[in-house]
Amino acid sequence: MNGDWAERSDRFVKFPEDEVEVFSAYTNLVYTNKIVTPEALFGEIPTMEKLRLEHDFLSKLYVLSEKLQDYRAKVHVLEAFLAVAQEKTAVVAWIVPGPVAVQTLYNGTPATSVARRLFVDLWTRTNVSSLSSHCRAMPHDFVCDLVLALHKLLYETGYDGRESKGTISLEEIIAKGAT
């Protein structure tokens, strides 16, 4: 270890706030370039709950990678977030990170984090009922980031907010932005 760290003399670094399973997944990722999570589906039909737990775990893994300043690991986790988001369930065809995953990520990353931007982008492609039902459980900074992203999306589509015969719904605007 270089620098003036307290752990330098011990040559032992403790991560008391990180779960053993998360650190184990990180170690596996470093050595194999593969992410194996407790919720790995291995051919099962995914359920919403399993996919939300997958996002929760990946958020913890991303935060650990952020702490360790491991760029390559963070890229792998971002790819995993996208893969989970695109999983199809019997109910929905787009899975967004739930409040626990968002809270974990926002508590453990800087405002400039690419992962934060990804979470916001994923949420801009969801429906209004999901947005309204989860809004209060989300971190304030996430809600602000989401409002700004949705405003930008509305602005880019030319929607001016006035009611008219030609007005399209928010779902249609979001769908246009997703293509």
Image: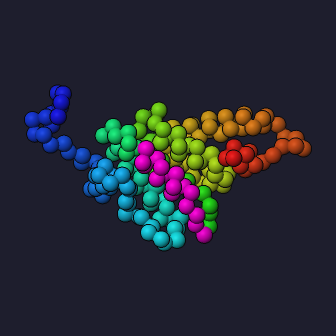
Q: Residue at (88%, 43%) from the top-left corner?
A: 166
Q: Is residue 92 above or below residue 160?
A: below
Residue 172 visible to an observer of this rendering: yes
Q: Where's residue 161, x and y in %?
A: 78, 37
For this rendering, which residue is in front, 135 or 150? 150
Q: Quadrant of residue 10?
A: top left
- Residue furthest to the right in view is 165
Identified at 51% across, 57% down, the residue is 84
Which one is in front, 124 or 99? 124
Name the residue at 72% across, 34% down. Answer: 156
Image side of residue 85 versus residue 72, left or right: right
**Image position, residue 81 (x, y; %):** 48, 51
Q: Residue at x 68, y 38 (%)?
A: 153
| Residue 142 in sight in this render | no
Residue 109 percent coordinates (x, y):
41, 38
Q: Residue furthest bottom?
A: 44
Q: Split into 4 quadrants, where in the image is the N terminus?
A: top left
Residue nearest the viewer, comparing 175 with 31: 31
- Residue pushed farthest left? 9
Q: Is residue 72 left or right of residue 173?
A: left
Q: Which residues are magenta?
A: 75-90
Is-magenta flag for residue 2?
A: no
Which residue is at the far front?
32
Helix, strand or loop for the magenta stretch, by majority: helix
Q: Is residue 50 left or right of residue 144?
A: left
For the rendered model, the colour scheme is rainbow
Residue 85 location (% of width, % of height): 54, 55
**83 in magenta:** yes
Position above or below: 123 against 51: above
Judging depth in this view, the residue of 103 and 63 nearest the camera is 63
